[in-house]
């Protein structure tokens, strides 16, 4: 049986549709909005080395932000599994500190440790949403973050609000890195996880 010409023309429109989750690692973000694909990919694909691409590198950001990310995740009851800790490069010694990290370096907490902790903190907060929620989530707007001046007068920080179904879910503070790409300095949930209609 031959299909009508209109069916043949329209058929390709539906091929390959259906997922907002990247299947390959997204490149470095050229604009704050680009970070959404990095977040979707990291949250759902669990390709942990990808976290370093969207993380800041300077100590003035990494130390305090790592502390705040894990503090927020702890308050929300979000934890990391042994498998996730291993994949994120977190050893037992550092894992024991994550819930109570200092905001600056110490003799037994180096910038290397802080960068690993920061990457783990990003993923730890992202896992509060299910893959189906990450499929639906989108940017609801980007605004200037004046408080970002704490990182220096030359630092540009933008806040990107993410949500779905008309509900604001989280605000992602996006930091312009020295190489010109965008990274993440903080993630804040605007609602408790119990207040999000997931799946």
Image: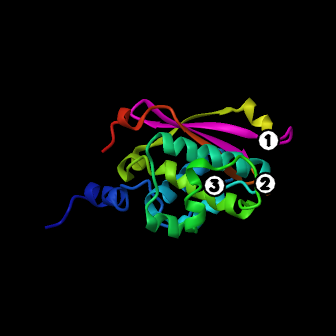
Please state the horizontal and vertical placement of residue 123, each as a whole percent of the image: 52, 55
Magenta-colored span: 152-175
Q: Which residue, given by chain and number where applicable, does mark 3 sit on?
A: 118
Q: Are marks 3 and 2 in contact (CB under 8 Å)?
A: no
Label 1 or label 3, whichever comes before in sequence order: 3
Helix, strand or loop for disc 2: loop
Q: Which mark is residue 58?
A: 2
Please state the horizontal and vertical placement of residue 163, each as a whole percent of the image: 46, 37
Out of 52 and 12, give the one closest to the viewer.
52
Q: Are marks 2 and 1 in contact (CB under 8 Å)?
A: yes
Q: Residue at x 67, y 51 (%)?
A: 183
Distance Cα–Cα, label 2 vs label 1: 10 Å
Q: Does 52 sit left or right of 153 as displayed?
A: left
Q: Residue at x 49, y 54 (%)?
A: 40
Please state the horizontal and vertical placement of residue 120, each as a whole percent of the image: 56, 57
Q: Considering only vertical position in the picture, is 112 above or below 66?
A: below
Question: Crowding at label 2, few (<14), some or many (≥20) Cα neighbours within 10 Å?
Answer: few
Question: Crowding at label 1, few (<14), some or many (≥20) Cα neighbours within 10 Å?
Answer: some
- Residue 154: in magenta span: yes
Label 2 or label 1, whichever comes before in sequence order: 2
Question: Crowding at label 3, few (<14), some or many (≥20) Cα neighbours within 10 Å?
Answer: many
- Residue 93: in magenta span: no
Distance Cα–Cα, label 3 vs label 2: 12 Å
Please state the horizontal and vertical placement of residue 128, each as a whole percent of the image: 43, 47
Q: Considering only vertical position in the picture, is 19 above or below 188?
A: below
User: Extreme left residue here?
Assistant: 1
Q: Which residue, given by chain and number where applicable, does mark 1 sit on?
A: 151
What predominant SS class does the magenta segment belong to? strand
């Amino acid at each position: 049986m031959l299909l009508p010409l209109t069916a043949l023309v329209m058929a390709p429109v539906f091929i390959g549709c259906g997922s907002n989750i990247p299947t390959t690692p997204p490149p470095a973000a050229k604009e704050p909005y680009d970070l959404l694909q990095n977040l979707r990919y990291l949250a759902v694909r669990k390709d942990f080395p990808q976290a370093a691409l969207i993380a800041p590198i300077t100590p003035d950001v990494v130390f305090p932000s790592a502390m705040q990310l894990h503090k927020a995740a702890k308050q929300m009851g979000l934890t990391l599994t042994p498998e996730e800790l291993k994949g994120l490069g977190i050893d037992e010694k550092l894992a024991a500190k994550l819930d109570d990290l200092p905001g600056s370096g110490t003799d037994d907490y180096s910038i290397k440790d802080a960068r690993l902790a920061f990457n783990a903190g990003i993923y730890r907060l992202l896992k509060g949403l299910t893959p189906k929620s990450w499929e639906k989530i989108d940017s609801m707007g980007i605004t200037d973050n004046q408080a970002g001046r704490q990182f220096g007068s030359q630092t540009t920080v933008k806040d990107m609000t993410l949500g779905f179904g008309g509900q604001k879910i989280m605000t992602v503070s996006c930091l312009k890195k020295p190489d010109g790409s965008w990274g993440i300095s903080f993630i804040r949930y605007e609602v408790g996880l119990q207040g999000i209609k997931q799946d």
